[in-house]
Amino acid sequence: MRPTTLVRLALVGTRTDTARVVLTALSALLATLAGLAALTVLAIATPAATDENPNRWSEQYHNALLVEPGLRGGTAFALLMLMIPVLALAGQCARLGAPSRDRRLAALRLAGATPGQVTRLVVLETGVAALLGTLVGLGVYLVGRDLLHRPDARGQLALPTDVLPSVGALAGVVLGLPVVAALATALMLRTVTTSPLGVSRKAARERGPGPWAGLLIGFGVVSFAVIRPVVYRFDDSEELAWLVPLLFAVGAFAAMIGVVIGTGWISYHCGRLLRRHARRAPALLAAGRLMADPWAGSRTFAALLAALIFGGGAAAQRAYFATKDQLEREQSRLVGADGGANPFYLSTMDLVDGAIAVAILIATGGLIVALVEGIVARRRAYAALVATGVPRATLSRSVAWQALTPAVPSILLALTVGTLLGRGLVAEVSTGGFSTTTVCEATAALCDNPATQAQYTRIVHIPEVRRAVPVPLEHLAWLGAGALVAVLVTVGVGLLFLRASTALDELRTA
């Protein structure tokens, strides 16, 4: 089969296939923008140290996240984290319309295509859609860079529109994302066999998932808990250059994977509890589905749970900065000074919370796609139930049970793990324990006069104060409520497709 024929077959299909290609391209576009934004932050040059600028700040910006070199790495990391829900959305979009695509692939096999050609066709479809998205994303990035380049009256910029990543970095994002998407598709198809009679997959294991995810979660929490002791132990040592980032990255990844995998265990055991204690048909139908495919929850809620883990960690960090700000204000009042701490960190956490809200919004889109895809994929089974006399209202409540039952404990687990990770870094605030600079208790004229300054000046000793960082229950409650609302909205949208998918005509669909 010639390459041009493969490309043409990859881009044809029904309206569902077109929607899948468009949504995959849109996901690739968003991921490209996040990746290019992170590379742009890293591309900011750090000036040489001078007498006027000993801290080597990039003073052409007015945002401290861009001005200070030490903060750019964290800013770029936060932007890269936005790619996680976007890539999860792409994975959900790739499953859209799977039954009709399976029938189309079976028809190609019947027409003489080999199994390898059919597999390459599916991989190429995902890769081409992702490439279209990354190319459009590159265009949006370049155009937006010119439109947003607006220096203020002081000549400072709000965004780093004066720098551009290297050509290699741009090519790596634009071409790398489609390659990763294609490889991920090939990995997912490793258990798929396409024959002229249809598409078959290896049967899932009958026993439920084991509790091994708890080991990953525990490893992640312990990794974060030992970061502070490691910093104290290897203070001013070269080992910190790689050990602390390694603990941070490996711990966060292990905890996130543990929570996502643990959702499968939660789904299975929620199904067992429903089957044992439920007495009505909707809950019993949901119990059967949860036990038959417990990993559906892991696939569906992966992006949302990842966003909630980072949200819980950010809430713990905000509680730390708020506690530190309160203590420093108390110390300022003790010495008779006005004002308080620098609000930079708290204002930065506002930006982090905004990024987490965007991630939850993107994850909600993935939830909607996953739920709708599941309903459409099982439309013949739902139609058969309606034909045997099962009311559509019963099926609607069953879908709601199936979505909400594992969602609530999974949300609580993600927020708890995220909070534990954050508190592993900052569980206590301590200030004081030193003599402050001299405090002059007189008018400005007397304090500025060297002859009278000494008699009005005193040294105030500030005692050391240690205070435990409180658990940010209110912030966590808002995050959990937002995630639960996202699930409810997803269920509501999915039920709109349920009526069309339970039409009796679906029983005659080939």
Image: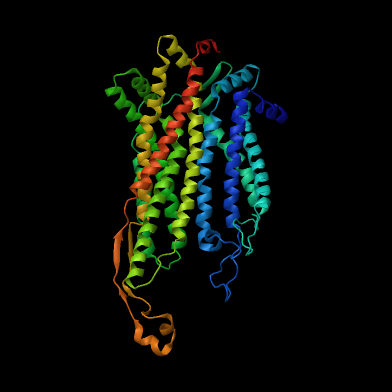
**Quadrant in which residue 454 is drawn:** bottom left
Residue 506 lies, with reference to residue 133, above or below; the image says above
Q: Position of residue 96 (x, y in %)?
A: 54, 27
Q: Position of residue 504 (x, y in %)?
A: 50, 11
The residue lying at 68 percent from left, 52 percent from top is 146
Examine the rendering and report whether any part of residue 219 can be seen. Answer: no
- Marks counted in the figure total 0
Task: Tell whether 322 sits left or right of 380.
Answer: left
Q: Quadrant of the C terminus?
A: top right
Residue 418 lies, with reference to residue 120, above or below; the image says below
Structure colour scheme = rainbow
Residue farthest toward the bottom in the current orientation of the protein: 451
**Quadrant in which residue 112 is drawn:** top right
Of 279 and 93, nearer the camera is 279
Residue 70 lies, with reference to residue 389, above or below; the image says below
Residue farthest toward the left in the current orientation of the protein: 277
Examine the rendering and report whether any part of residue 89 can be seen. Answer: yes
Q: Position of residue 118 (x, y in %)?
A: 61, 25
Residue 510 lies, with reference to residue 177, above or below; the image says above
Task: Tell whether 179 sits left or right of 339.
Answer: right
Q: Position of residue 443 (x, y in %)?
A: 40, 80
**Quadrant in which residue 6 is drawn:** top right
Of 167 and 316, nearer the camera is 316
The residue lying at 45 percent from left, 33 percent from top is 300
Q: Quadrant of the N terminus?
A: top right
